[in-house]
Amino acid sequence: MTIDDVLANMPGLMGAEQDWLRKHPDLVLDQAKNRRLTVYFDEGVERGLERGSPEFQRISRTASASATMVAPAPNAMTSK
């Protein structure tokens, strides 16, 4: 499954959000990273931040930086 396949099933995303996720496909394709991104996204919505605003974008960047610290899934470390 590609990033575009996943984004096609997320019709509520703004164009800028889709573009950002295309630049950070691991945040969508890796389940652990996606869960972390979802938490940050929900936090921004709960705080009343406007999607696409600089403040909301800061949360996304924080989520991206935080998600890179997530350990890889055990099956991602097996050799093929």
Image (cartoon, rainbow, N blue to C red):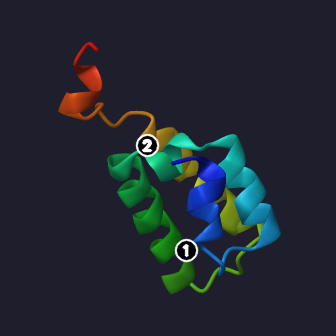
Q: Residue furthest left?
A: 74
* Picture layout, residue 11 above or below residue 59: below
Q: Is residue 59 visible?
A: no
Spot occupied by residue 1 in the image (x, y as percentages of width and height)? 51, 48
Spot occupied by residue 67 in the image (x, y as percentages of width and height)? 43, 43
What amino acid does circle 1 point to? Gly
Spot occupied by residue 33 in the image (x, y as percentages of width and height)? 40, 48
The quadrant holding residue 30 is top left
What amino acid does circle 2 point to? Ala
Spot occupied by residue 32 in the image (x, y as percentages of width and height)? 33, 49
- Judge the density around disc 1: few (<14), some (14-19), many (≥20) Cα neighbours within 10 Å: some
Q: Are marks 1 and 2 in contact (CB under 8 Å)?
A: no
- Report the Cα–Cα distance between label 1 and label 2: 16 Å
Q: From the viewer's perspective, is the residue at label 1 or at label 2 nearer?
A: 2
Q: Residue at x 67, y 67 (%)?
A: 56
Q: Residue furthest top?
A: 79
* Picture layout, residue 48 above or below residue 63: below
Circle nearer the N terminus (1, 2): 1
Q: Residue at x 60, y 58 (%)?
A: 5
Which secondary structure, mark 2?
helix
Locate the C terminus by quadrant: top left
Q: Nearer the viewer, residue 31 or 68?
A: 31
The residue that label 1 is drawn on is 44
* Picture layout, residue 1 above or below residue 10: above
Left or right position of 48 against 79: right
- Judge the density around disc 2: few (<14), some (14-19), many (≥20) Cα neighbours within 10 Å: some
Which secondary structure, mark 1?
helix
Q: Residue at x 44, y 43 (%)?
A: 66
The residue that label 2 is drawn on is 67
The quadrant holding residue 74 is top left
Q: Is residue 17 visible?
A: yes
